[in-house]
Amino acid sequence: MQKGLGFIPNAFKTLAHSPAALNGYLGLSQTLGKGSLSAAEREVVALATSEINGCDYCLAAHSFFGAKAGLNDEAIHKARTGTLSAVAALAHQITESRGRLSDAQIAAAREAGLAYSKIVEVVAQVTLLTLTNYLNNIAATDIDFPPSSH
């Protein structure tokens, strides 16, 4: 992490208070990075989830990473509101409903072209982000990324 960014983000310093939690997070994150969601789609999930969970730290971090993954300002804003894409809408719905989607919502995701494998990966990404959202909210982690202006 330090090699790529030039610093260790405060979120990882907070997570490192539990080596087990840090290793679990890193393992799942690395595994999902090899899945069917693109880097931009993973950032879309992160932005939608962090918006619903009210995590200012994660919104700043994932606005930064989203831009690095090719999202422009409008796309970042739409990702946060769940209106950018089927992936954004699904992440927004999962987070808002705490995983209690209706059959109609799942059908809409499928009709929008999301395979079941991608739906499962969106659920996994929401879970990963909820961990960091909750932890950074509880710890009031100091934001060490440019503030999100979206």
Image: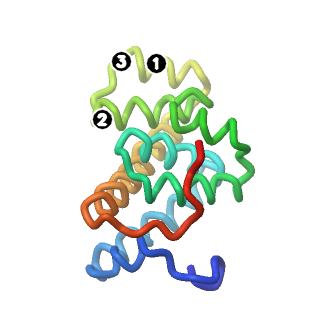
Residue contact at pointers 1 and 3, CB within 8 angstroms: yes
Above or below: residue 35 compared with residue 87: below
**Identity of the amino acid at label 3?**
Asp
Residue contact at pointers 2 and 1, CB within 8 angstroms: no
**Identity of the amino acid at label 2?**
Gly
**Identity of the amino acid at label 1?**
Ala
Mark 2 sits on what residue? 99
Q: Earlier in the sequence, mark 2 or mark 1?
A: 2
- Image quadrant holding the C terminus, namely top right
Residue 106 in the image, given as x and y percentages of width and height = 42, 23
At a point 74% along the width and 50% down the height, the residue shown is 70
- Quadrant for residue 28, please give it: bottom left
Q: Which mark is residue 107?
A: 1
Q: CA distance from mark 2 to mark 1?
A: 15 Å
Q: CA distance from mark 1 to mark 3?
A: 6 Å
Residue density around tag 1, few if under 14, some if 14–19, many if 20 or more, within 10 Å = few
